[in-house]
Image: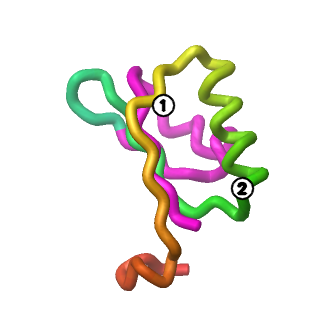
Amino acid sequence: MYVEIRIKGSLKQDWSDWLEGLSVSNQAHEETVLEGHISDQAALLGLLNRIHGLNLQLLSFSQSDKSELPNVKQ
């Protein structure tokens, strides 16, 4: 599944490996977007637990089936 997670706060790019390999993109107003492919719901739960453990505020979450994203390379 492909996910996009928006959190309050700024993270460095080198957090990507620790965050299931998702890309880390800092936005305006101290928001960070994490996006990419997650292998399954267990990995997603682990990722959300890591975000919670860092005391980061979850702003939004969206997911889609990779077949719905024609421009995403697998």
- Per the model, the C-alpha gap separating discs 2 and 1 is 25 Å
Report which residue position mark 2 lands on: 41
Report which residue position mark 1 lands on: 12
Q: Residues within 10 Å of mark 1 (few under 14, many from 20)?
A: few
Q: Quadrant of residue 60?
A: top left
Mark 2 vs mark 1, foreground winner is 2
Question: In the image, what residue type sits under mark 1?
Answer: Lys
Residue positioned 49% across, 39% down in the render = 13
In this rendering, would 42 be left or right of 28? right
The question of residue 2 being in magenta is answered with: yes
Residue positioned 63% across, 23% down in the render = 52
In the rendered structure, which segment of residues is drawn in magenta?
A: 1-25
Residue 73 in the image: state x and y as whole percent: 48, 80
| Most foreground residue, 53 or 10 | 53
- Assign the C terminus to one quadrant of the image: bottom right
| Most foreground residue, 20 or 40 | 40
- Assign the N terminus to one quadrant of the image: bottom right
Residue positioned 60% across, 28% down in the render = 51
The question of residue 26 being in magenta is answered with: no
Residue 31 in the image: state x and y as whole percent: 33, 29
Question: In the image, what residue type sits under mark 2?
Answer: Gln
Label located before the other in sequence (2 or 1): 1
* Disc 1 secondary structure class: loop
